[in-house]
Every structure is written in structure tokens, then in C-alpha cells.
């Protein structure tokens, strides 16, 4: 399916191969190391706080909920009685796109507002082509699709061109202080991924054309919000569906992050805390377990496509001296993450149950690969996990969550990326803090 996404992403890390991929990884990989993630916490927290602000606006201005099964409808709606109806996939998509827009190209939330509809319509068209490949040849469909991709390309191109121009101006002035990729404040030209690509490619003497940079930024913008929003969606849904697990998560949030003034907690002597720091969110291991279990049951990427670059033998039993199956060079391989994550031989007879505790012990090697594995493991996995923990932790500090009455078992498509609920997923939020 990579050829479908190459239509939009070009030859970024997800879709490139060989020496191009390895050289780009040298530039981009260090930007996502675990040790660099804490500096992004202010962005995660700001987006989470704005998420709460939007929820509060909806709560105070209730409206009649319409189009409940339409994921393109308003995802956050007040419904009276001090409650809020949230369609999870749409609501979290806005949050994660705001985060990655700031992290990747330093856009403020208002400037990033152009992306949600643009990305969603482009991705919807690509996913439909999995089953309807003729759409790529039918001009009435192809022309508006190409127009939307052109709009996306122009936005990213103009940002890169302006950033390069500013860097050259600073160099002529003998000022290189803003080119330091370790700065802690992130904004336009202040240590975002674009700034660091420009810096690292120059320092490592790895040529990056403006098209190369565009491909990598589009890859980060798309992959960095769609899969993260679905991880949040499925985790929140599963916690709401299992109140016993939700209670454990909430109690740990109260214990580690502290409670807001006026909030009642079942945790004895829970401390009041307004702004918990990154180190406190790091202690929320039960949310970690819950997100991993959600990724197992609903991996946003359900299938991987690979090709052998040399002959290999798989399934070889060296102890009993039984040969494996030989795969010659250029063999196409499809790996079903969905099937692997629900394999009873790997996970036991309770494979279909939501049990975050199962991840207290390490799974069998390579049996859990929501972010792929090996050399091509997703570089953004630590960013995604930390971002999601801040968003969920903040949400649980403010609201109790429950499934909306009548919310049916979600229908998914196991061959569409990312795996998302066909008809949306709704929960009800009730403030923990009294008016």
C-alpha cells in the first residue's frame, strides 16, 4: 500500500528505501530519541489545555446533537445536564494535528487550522482506492484530489522556503544562535523539526533538497497525527467500556498528577496540583499499559508490506536441524499485525479481552509490533506515547468518562490505515469539578 501514500508523502522515511532512507534516517532519527521528548512537554500540555477549553465551551453552550454516526460532524457537543458528547476520533484528530503542526513546522493552533479537513479528505481518498483503484484514473475524482495535494504541497513549500531564507539572512549577519537544535522554546524557527532538519543535514553534510524536506515534513504531519489520534481513540473507548480498568487509571492519575481544586478523589490525601510537570506524567505507567493493550487490539497500522533485498530463510529450526522456507530476493511480504496481535498461541485464550496488566511482563519478541520493528521501527513512537499520556491524563483529571448509551460495538476495516471506527465512537464527559 506504500505506493498509494507515496502519491502524497513522496519519498519520506515511511516510503523511501535503500541509501536514501538510511541517509535521511541519520538526519531525522536523532530528533525523536527518548531523551529529547521532555522538551516537547509544553506543546503537549498546551494542546491538552486547549482541548479542555473547547470541551468547556461546548458544555456551557449545549446544542442538539445531530449526525451521531457522522465522523465529519462537530466532534464536541454540549448536551445539557452538565454533560458533553464527544466523538473520539474527530476530537482527538484535532488535538494531535495541533501538536504535530507545532512540533514539525512551528505552527500556532490558528495557523494549523487549515490542515484537518485537507488531510482527512486526502486520506479518505487514498483509503477508498484500496478497494476502488479505478478512482485514480477517473478525472472527476483525480483532479480534486490532485488539487488538495497541491494545496498541501504549497503550504509546506512556502514554510520551508521562508525558513531557508531567514537562515541565510542570519548567516550573512553572522548570527547562528537561532540555528541551535537543542533550544527549549518551540515556535516558528525555534527548534522545530524543520529547523533541526536544516541544521542536521548541513552539519552531517547530507544534501536535502526542498522536495526532500517537504516529503519528510508531510510524512511527520500525516503519520504524526492520524495514528496518534487513533491510539487515543481506542484507549479512551476501551477504558470507558471497562470501568474497573478506568478506575485504576483515574486513581493513578490522581495520585501522581494530583487533583484540581474542588475535585473529589477516592485516593486518600490526594494532593492538589494545578500544573503537573512532565516528570509526573512519566509516572503514569497504567496509562502506558492501557495504550499498549489498545494498540494490540486495534493497531492503527494493521498490515506491513516488505520486500526482501536478498535471499533469506524463515522458520529454520537450528536445534532440530529442520530447514526453513527460502524466500528469494525481491519477494513481496505482507505481515498482518492485526492477526499477530490477536493470535491465541502468542497471547493466550484471553486474547480478545482488554487486559492492560498483560504488559507488566514483556511480550514474546516481535509479537507486539504496532510501531513496526527492527531498523524501520517508527521514529516517532516515543513522541506519540508521551503525547497521548499527557492528553489522556489531562482529560481524566477534569472529567469522568462513560460510553454513550446505545454506542454499538465499533465496526472497523482491518485493511484501511489507520484502523478507525467506521461510524465514530461516542463517550459522555461529566465534570469532576463542581460548578
Image (cartoon, rainbow, N blue to C red):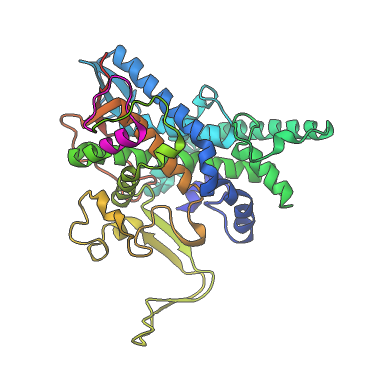
Residue occupying image coordinates x 39% and y 33%: 391
Q: Is residue 199 visible?
A: yes
Which of these two is toward me, 128 or 209? 209
59 on left or right of 126: left
Magenta highlight on residue 252: yes
Count of marks placed on residues: 0
Instruction: Name the image quarter holding the C terminus.
Output: top left
Extent of the magenta region: 250-267
Residue occupying image coordinates x 76% and y 36%: 176
| Residue farthest to the left, as pictured | 406
Residue occupying image coordinates x 30% and y 54%: 359
| Residue farthest to the front, as pictured | 269
359 on left or right of 6: left
329 on left or right of 325: right
Q: Quadrant of residue 319?
A: bottom left
Position of 308 relative to 224 (above/below) = below
Position of 240 relative to 378 (above/below) = above
Position of 296 relative to 316 (above/below) = above
Residue occupying image coordinates x 39% and y 50%: 301
Magenta highlight on residue 392: no
Whole-percent x, y for residue 350 in the image: 18, 56
Whole-percent x, y for residue 364 in the image: 33, 64
Whole-percent x, y for residue 153 in the image: 59, 35
Whole-percent x, y for residue 375 in the image: 52, 61
Q: Is residue 422 visible?
A: no
Amino acid at each position: 500500500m506504500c505506493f498509494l501514500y507515496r502519491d502524497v508523502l513522496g519519498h519520506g522515511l515511511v516510503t523511501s528505501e535503500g541509501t536514501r532512507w538510511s541517509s535521511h534516517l541519520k538526519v531525522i532519527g536523532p530528533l525523536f530519541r527518548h531523551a529529547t521528548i521532555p522538551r516537547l512537554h509544553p506543546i503537549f500540555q498546551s494542546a491538552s489545555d486547549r482541548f479542555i477549553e473547547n470541551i468547556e465551551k461546548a458544555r456551557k453552550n449545549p446544542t442538539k446533537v445531530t449526525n451521531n454516526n457522522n465522523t465529519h460532524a462537530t466532534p464536541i457537543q454540549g448536551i445539557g445536564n452538565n454533560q458533553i458528547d464527544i466523538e473520539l476520533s474527530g476530537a482527538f484528530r484535532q488535538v494531535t494535528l495541533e501538536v504535530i503542526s507545532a512540533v514539525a513546522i512551528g505552527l500556532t493552533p490558528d495557523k494549523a487550522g487549515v490542515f484537518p479537513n485537507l488531510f482527512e479528505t486526502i486520506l479518505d481518498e487514498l483509503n477508498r482506492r484500496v478497494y476502488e483503484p479505478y478512482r485514480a484514473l477517473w478525472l472527476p475524482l483525480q483532479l480534486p484530489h490532485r488539487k488538495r495535494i497541491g494545496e498541501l504541497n504549497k503550504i509546506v513549500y512556502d514554510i520551508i522556503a521562508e525558513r531557508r531564507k531567514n537562515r541565510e539572512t542570519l548567516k550573512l549577519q553572522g548570527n547562528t544562535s537561532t540555528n541551535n537544535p537543542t533550544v527549549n522554546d518551540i515556535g516558528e524557527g525555534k527548534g522545530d523539526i524543520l529547523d533541526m532538519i536544516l541544521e542536521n543535514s548541513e552539519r552531517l553534510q547530507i544534501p536535502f533538497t526542498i522536495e526532500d524536506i517537504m516529503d519528510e515534513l508531510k510524512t511527520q504531519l500525516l503519520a504524526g497525527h492520524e495514528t496518534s489520534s487513533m491510539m487515543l481513540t481506542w484507549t479512551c473507548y476501551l477504558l470507558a467500556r471497562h470501568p474497573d480498568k478506568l478506575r485504576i487509571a483515574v486513581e493513578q492519575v490522581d495520585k501522581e498528577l494530583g487533583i484540581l481544586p474542588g475535585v473529589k478523589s477516592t485516593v486518600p490525601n490526594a494532593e492538589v496540583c494545578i500544573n503537573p510537570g512532565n516528570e509526573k506524567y512519566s509516572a503514569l505507567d497504567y496509562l502506558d499499559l492501557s495504550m499498549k493493550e489498545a494498540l494490540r487490539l486495534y493497531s492503527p497500522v494493521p498490515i506491513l508490506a516488505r520486500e526482501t533485498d536478498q535471499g533469506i530463510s524463515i522458520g529454520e529450526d537450528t536445534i532440530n536441524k529442520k530447514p526453513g522456507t527460502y524466500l528469494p530476493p525481491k519477494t513481496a511480504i505482507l505481515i498482518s499485525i492485526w492477526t499477530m496481535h490477536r493470535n491465541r498461541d502468542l497471547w493466550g485464550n484471553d486474547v480478545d479481552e482488554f487486559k492492560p496488566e498483560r504488559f507488566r511482563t514483556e511480550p514474546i519478541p516481535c509479537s507486539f509490533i504496532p510501531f513496526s520493528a527492527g531498523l524501520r521501527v517508527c521514529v516517532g513512537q516515543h513522541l506519540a506515547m508521551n503525547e497521548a499520556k499527557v492528553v489522556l491524563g489531562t482529560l481524566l483529571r477534569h472529567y469522568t468518562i462513560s460510553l454513550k448509551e446505545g454506542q454499538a460495538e465499533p465496526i472497523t476495516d482491518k485493511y484501511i490505515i489507520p484502523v478507525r471506527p467506521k461510524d465514530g465512537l461516542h463517550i459522555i464527559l461529566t465534570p469532576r469539578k463542581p460548578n
